[in-house]
Image (tube, rainbow, N blue to C red):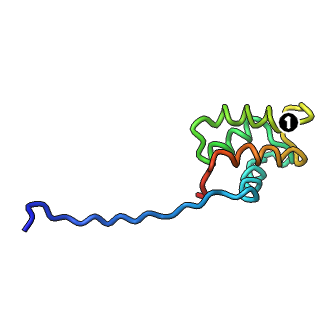
Amino acid sequence: MSLFAFTINYTKTARMPITDDQLRGVFKKFDTDGDKKLSKDELKAAFEYLGSYIPGWQAFLGLQLADANRDGFVNEDELNALVAYASKFGYLIK
């Protein structure tokens, strides 16, 4: 008989990668003022929600990449570029 007898109950929940459609939904959810444009602050909040370690930096880079008309926002037409950028990071469904 062993001197140390213990049982470990460990359950791991499988987490799946987030899809592009789900990412799009997350970004739209963080359009808090409802203007159909994402500001840098709204992007930062979305990247925080997704679990980014550096949400401010990812918001800055995402905005630089996706903001084709350079108005300082990501609009509906530019959202696909933002989703393509964010999908590279392998975020998981919460």
Q: What residue is drawn where x is 64% and y is 45%?
A: 89
* Identity, as a three-letter code, of the amino acid under mark 1: Asp
**Residue at the spot 8% in from the left edge and 61% down from the top edge:** 3
Q: In terms of image quadrants, where is residue 16?
A: bottom right
**The C terminus appears in which quarter of the rendering?**
bottom right
Asked whether, in this view, residue 83 is left or right of residue 4, the answer is right
Residue displayed at 75% across by 49% down: 27
Which quadrant of the figure has residue 19?
bottom right
The residue lying toward the viewer, choosing from 7 and 2, is 2
User: Going by the image, does 63 lie left or right of 49?
Assistant: right
Question: How dense is the environment of label 1, judged by Cα within 10 Å: few (below 14), some, or many (20 and up)?
Answer: many
The residue lying toward the viewer, choosing from 88 and 80, is 88
Decide if residue 88 is on the left or right side of residue 73: left
Horizontal arrangement in the rendering, residue 54 relative to residue 24 (left or right): left
Q: Position of residue 68 (x, y in %)?
A: 89, 36
Q: Secondary structure at mark 1?
A: loop
Q: Residue furthest bottom?
A: 1
Residue that label 1 marks:
67
Q: Quadrant of the N terminus?
A: bottom left
Q: Specify the farthest residue to the right.
A: 69
Badge count: 1
View extreme (front): residue: 88
